Image: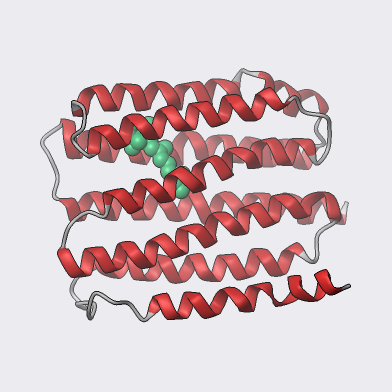
Amino acid sequence: MQLKFISKLMPFLILFPATSFAAGHGGALNPTDAVGISFWVISVAMVAATVFFLMETQRVPDKWKTSMVVGALVTLVAAIHYFYMRDVWVATGESPTVFRYVDWLITVPLQMIEFYLILSAVTAVAFGVFWRLLIGTLVMLLGGYLGEAGQIDATVGFVIGMLGWFFILYEIFLGEASKISANDAPASVQSAFSTMKWIVTIGWAIYPIGYAIGYLGGGMDGGSLNLIYNIADVINKIAFCLVIWACATSESRA
Ligand SMILES: *C/C=C(C)/C=C/C=C(C)/C=C/C1=C(C)CCCC1(C)C
């Protein structure tokens, strides 16, 4: 009873710190700064998505609640990092690389957990699925970070990152996760799994392409790279979690 009450208040509890972060500390946003504005708009969209997912959590059947809450955590964690990243960008004009990777380090594993959760909402799933997706994520992000931060050669970092990503793709296209989805999951879960799988393929491809142009190819200014990463995050965070929401609500109607 009490828990239910608190959970109803959650979305509003989140709005308070969010609006205080939103006030910003690094000074005013220049209306001609497209990158700064994209940080701003996306941070607001992440807060809105968080409230939406938390409210909707109360509407879906119990077995879907964890997936929905994890989805809300993805957008909440991203919202907070976006407010900070905007501050760094506005105050210094530099890429907030560390914040970006801290955000990815938290939100990408949470999204990998989602693959595990939507399957385990409907059938028994070995924990190895989760571990393999997690390890792939860590390798991918570690390689990328060391390369972007200049700790290792940018090409080596890229190759390590790509290997981690391919490992994830293998698991969801051909590995155990894909087999569980194909053999044991109802149609609604299969279709969510499939859409999420394609987001991880096509939506995620935007990041290595940005990295490659920025660090390996002709080079790109920090602003453009941030804009590319920002747009990719809208697809890969908000749309990704909306797919889970759609699955949970269509399952519950069925
Ligand atoms: C919400 C944030 C997401 C979904 C971030 C995803 C990031 C990637 C898929 C990054 C991938 C990279 C490679 C595949 C190669 C090396 C460089 C990276 C880290 C940009």
Above or below residue 251? Residue 35 is below
Please state which of residues 183 and 71 is positioned toward the viewer in this rendering.
71
Tell me, what colour scheme is on the image? secondary structure
The residue lying at 64 percent from left, 73 percent from top is 11
Total marks in image: 0
Ligand 1 occupies quarter: top left
Picture quarter containing residue 195?
top right
- Whole-percent x and y of residue 93? 16, 62
The residue lying at 67 percent from left, 23 percent from top is 128
Above or below residue 106? Residue 37 is below
The residue lying at 50 percent from left, 76 percent from top is 17
Please state which of residues 234 and 14 is positioned toward the viewer in this rendering.
14
Picture quarter containing residue 227?
bottom left
- Whole-percent x and y of residue 84? 34, 65
Q: Is residue 102 left or right of residue 252?
A: left
- Whole-percent x and y of residue 107? 50, 48
The residue lying at 54 percent from left, 36 percent from top is 198
Quadrant housing the N terminus: bottom right
Please state which of residues 26 and 191 is positioned toward the viewer in this rendering.
26
Q: Is residue 208 visible?
A: no
- Whole-percent x and y of residue 60? 81, 59
Q: Is residue 32 left or right of residue 146?
A: left
**Residue most extreme to the front:** 2
Q: Is residue 224 visible?
A: yes
